[in-house]
Image: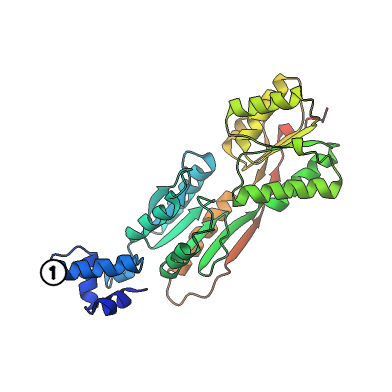
Amino acid sequence: MTIYDIAKKCNVSIATVSRVLNGSDRVSEKTRAKVLAAMKEQDYAPNPFARGLGLDSMKMVGVLCSDVADAFYAKAVSLIENALQKHNFDVMLSCTGECNGKDIKALRYLMQKHVDAVIIIGTPFAVQGNVAAIKKIAEQIPLVTINNNYKLQGTYSIVCDEQTGMRNAVYALANKGCRSILYLYDSLTYSGQHKLTGYKQGVLELGLDAQPALIQKTPRTFEAVESMIHMLLKQKVPFDAILTSEDILAVAAQRIARRNNRCVPVIGCNNSIIAECATPTLTSLDNQLDCLCETAIKTVIHLMQSNAPALPSKTVFDAKLIERESFQIHPQ
């Protein structure tokens, strides 16, 4: 559905539809109501080119994530904003939080603000049940995702192969003699699912201890991780290494384990500033966030150019294990 379709449906000119979109008073209330009703019926959000009628761009990119308070998302937003400013684009940020139902609403909000493109960081929402809405948006403006893959025509995914990265982390721990690797995670987003699959894959391939108690879901707080570690120690669940889906979980687990005289190798994920500040410094899986964001920006700029050659719908980067002090500890 385009501005031309709306004009044809309402039997008015494109200029009239444009006046309605721009809030001009040069349109009768009857015509305005008819155009707005048609737009609502067709779930139409105008793209900036149609709205501007001759303007090349609104110079605005929408960025969607679940929570900018999260260190990963905060860094991603900062990288994206700085890169876009070099191309004279501004950023409009929308956060969905953890509340269901805010996802598509947030996307539509960005569309109504007439952004030139949308970048979705991580997995603010699942694609199930939202296919039609996402497709409609991708038909109107470039839609690029970072560490998520909707597998829908018109969407472009920039991802890190964290599954293979986690598998390799298991192999690295096994090479140090670890046999019972405790895995802590906080969510099963697109990224979270692949990390967990990589852990299970490595454990299975190497014939390591695969008891269910070695896989634990826990909130991302020191208190929650402390309670989890104490429970495992009380139940005498054997573990000689710790691998986590997030650096913050690894740092918390490392501190609590050491307090209980359990000094084991620990590996986190994201290679955040937290890993460098921990004591001992934390070995972490680097998911190449800088590269992901840089490629996302290049993709967006490319897609907004006229007659630009086609791009791959998915670009994949390898994860890298950054070894620090926590990896040098020998398993007990």
Relative horizontal placement of residue 63, taking residue 287 as reference (left or right): left
Spot occupied by residue 238 in the image (x, y as percentages of width and height):
81, 30
Whether residue 256 is visible here, answered yes or no, is yes
Q: Residue at x 77, y 34 (%)?
A: 241
Whether residue 279 is visible here, answered yes or no, is no
Residue 313 vs residue 295, the one in the foreground: 313
Q: Quadrant of residue 115?
A: bottom left
In the picture, the quarter occupied by the C terminus is top right
Which residue is labeled 1 in the image?
A: 28
Q: Residue at x 48, y 46 (%)?
A: 66
Q: Quadrant of residue 104?
A: bottom left
Relative horizontal placement of residue 161, taking residue 81 as reference (left or right): right
Above/below status of 120 relative to 170: below
The amino acid on which the numbered mark 1 sits, given as a three-letter code, is Ser
Above/below status of 33 relative to 200: below
Q: Quadrant of residue 10?
A: bottom left
